[in-house]
Image (cartoon, grey):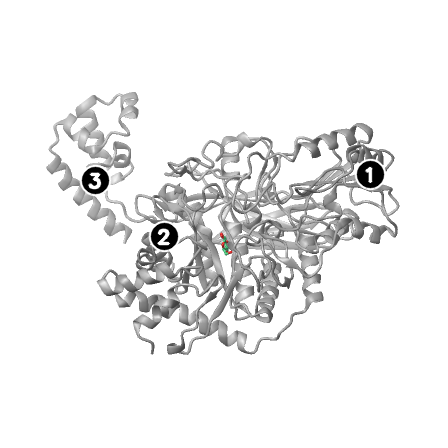
Amino acid sequence: MADVHAKIPLTGGSDFWHTPAIPEADLPELMWTDGPHGVRKQSGSTDHVGINSSEPATCFPPAVGLASSWNPGLLERVGVALGEECRALGVGVLLGPGMNIKRSPLCGRNFEYFAEDPFVAGELASALVRGIQSQGVGTSLKHFAVNNQETDRMRRDSQVDERTLREIYLRGFGKVVLSAQPWTVMCSYNRVNGTFASENHWLLTEVLRDEWGFEGVVVSDWGAVWDRVRALKAGLDLEMPANRTHEDGVREALAAGGIDEATIDRAFGRIERIVRRAAASLADAPDSFDVAGHHALARATAEQCIVLLANDGVLPLARETTVAVVGEFARTPRYQGAGSSRVNPTRLDNALDAIAALVGHEVPFAPGFATAAGQELPADAREQAVAVAKDADVVLAFLGLGENHESEGYDREHADLPEEQLTLLEDILAVNPNVVVVLSNGASVLLPFADRVRAIVEGWLLGQAGGGALADVLYGVVNPSGKLTETIPHRLADVPSYLYFPGDDSGVRYGEGLFVGYRGYDALGTDVAFPFGHGLSYTTFAYSDLSVTATDGGLSVAVTVTNTGSRAGREVVQAYASIAGSKVVRVPRELKGFASVTLEPGASARVEIAIPAAELAFWSVQDHAWVVEGGEYTVEVGSSSRDLRLSGTVAVAGDEPFRPLTLASTVAEGMSVPAFAEVVGRMAGDAFGSDPDLMKMMESMPLAALAGFSGQSPRQLQALLDHVNAVRQAAQG
Ligand code: GLC
């Protein structure tokens, strides 16, 4: 086996995309590359921001689209296809999925992430990881952690309180590690509460490994390591890309006793295990993949990612309806995000051609506005668009964000659509009120026109086959079933993180705490344009017969869903949980389960959702542990977070740890213990008389203070407390 000096090179890349061969260990080099929604294999010049070209691969919908399907089974199938393409292209680890929480619609990289909610993000990322890794290809769960903006992303300090960090920003990652065992986790660029993620021992070792049992490789984001010795000691294993200076630094530190051999051996062993696993899978890999089959999967996937936000019945269109199509996005689709995830698609469908194919003839079209920098348009582009729109039965206005409006590497300045698009829409509405807006965007945009157009189709970014999927939805070949995994607000100032995002050189404070996304809008009672979980269908669904029962493992929820419309459709049933009278701060409700059901007209089905007890737990800062609070839980089920059709309650025993009464316990806490209430009452009477109003005022007084006021000696009181605690603990068992 190689000696420690021969192992050091494996703690870093040999170039931009490979870990080095280690001849002394008979270890081959291995290629690690992006992801997440397609394979970006560069053979010539390399970069980590998607500038140089890459080999053709299927461009599936980025996470913003995939997430809107709420379909783990579908994402697992996409993962299998991604794994197949990795093998055919000789890639051992695919750098994805990205699953950072969408804290603000302004984050330039929201297109690459799943949701504003850790539950749905964790469920969907786990499915992708399972699918990819089923093919003997590794994944890299990223960016660990609290990387929720692009502004100053390589330095900024994400400052998050303990409970918020646990319940919102780490919870989804933990679910994926525990349920899908990603081969690798990619640490983020930013600081987490003062320490760079790449050298954050608490994050990379105490949480990721000691608590979650992660056994894979921690790889850095590209260029995220400031000091490889500090990083290795914190629990990072692999610095990417190559950095010879840092490699020399490890040699020097080893010679000087600044790092021990065991640390290097540990990193080497973890990486070696991954490399051997991947190499074995690549050894008999085919040299091609099913291009047509994967494109068909990309199409079928995109169809489930489209969210019908609003529809007055104008959709689905009849083929004989005369339409005019306005907007370059219809001809030149925006189908993925800019930056490291940019894929070179095997083919690219556009909606304009797909519509023409559906209706059997060309349809009037005008680009209307530029969608990319430097795009040449006729001087009268706007007039042409209005002229085209004027006489149509229905105008399909393809609006959205161009690649330079949102990207990895920088955040948006505002959440509006580009001014020239809004102006053109007004001009079109002035001559024709029958407008359907079709959106292409990687993050929520404000929709001030929502009540003045006849329908809005949120297409997000749909990958290479999205154009055909959009046409199928517009004409009813496909019944849309996508649901939002991020709220669309009326105003940017309504976003709970608005006052804190993106911070400044002193850091970015997550001042909204737990109240991110729908958790915040619901707590503040803020009206929103379209809520988390929202998505319409061309049919309707009724909910009945809800049952919520406690089981040994948690809660069992069942509800009957009936298709009350005239066409088949898929409904994503969502289950939200809350607890009344909690002892800790709570958000109004949280998503704790979901399930899809596809029904023919008039058909019904019993939909069952299991909510594990662990999902009900909150992070107790007092105990630094997950705790299920005992009490009465309410489970609400429905079609969105604000279209909750039925609710039920159930008592849950909880697993709160025994908390002894102490001198710092309050009067109220003392009174809540029957064996002690009389003592507290007597002390209070001695001190302040038994005026009930006064008692109310004293509820938050520590017992030590009450002892002082009532002349009780703290030692006597402590002896009494010890006795009461012993009796309580015995009774609790
Ligand atoms: C980029 C991204 C990361 C990507 C890596 C390699 O900076 O942050 O997601 O996998 O570098 O391109």
The reply to whether residue 540 is in sight is yes
Q: Is residue 667 above or below residue 198?
A: above
Question: Residue 74 location in percent, x, y?
Answer: 62, 59
SS at mark 2 in the image: loop
Label 3 CA crowd tier, 10 Å (few <14, some 14–19, many 20+): some
Residue 672 falls in which quadrant of the image? top left
Q: Nearer the viewer, residue 323 or 504?
A: 504
Question: Residue 688 location in percent, x, y?
Answer: 20, 22
Quadrant occupied by the N terminus: bottom left
Quadrant occupied by the C terminus: bottom left
* Amino acid type for the residue under numbered disc 1: Val
Query: Where is mark 3, residue-wise?
Result: 662
Residue 394's mark? 1
Q: Is residue 414 left or right of residue 472?
A: left
Question: Residue 633 location in percent, x, y?
Answer: 46, 44
Question: Residue 446 location in percent, x, y?
Answer: 62, 34
The answer for how far apart the CA atoms under marks 2 and 3 are is 46 Å
Residue 299 falls in which quadrant of the image? bottom right
Label 1 CA crowd tier, 10 Å (few <14, some 14–19, many 20+): many
Is the residue indicated by label 1 positioned so its CB lies within 8 Å of ligand 1?
no
Q: Is residue 708 left or right of residue 491?
A: left
Query: Where is mark 2, residue-wise?
Result: 226
* Pointer 2 with pointer 3, Cβ within 8 A: no
Pointer 2 or 1: first along the chain: 2
Q: Is residue 239 above or below residue 30?
A: above
Residue 444 falls in which quadrant of the image? top right
* Amino acid type for the residue under numbered disc 2: Trp
Pointer 2 or 3: first along the chain: 2
**Residue located 49% across and 46% down the image:** 101
The reply to whether residue 629 is in sight is no
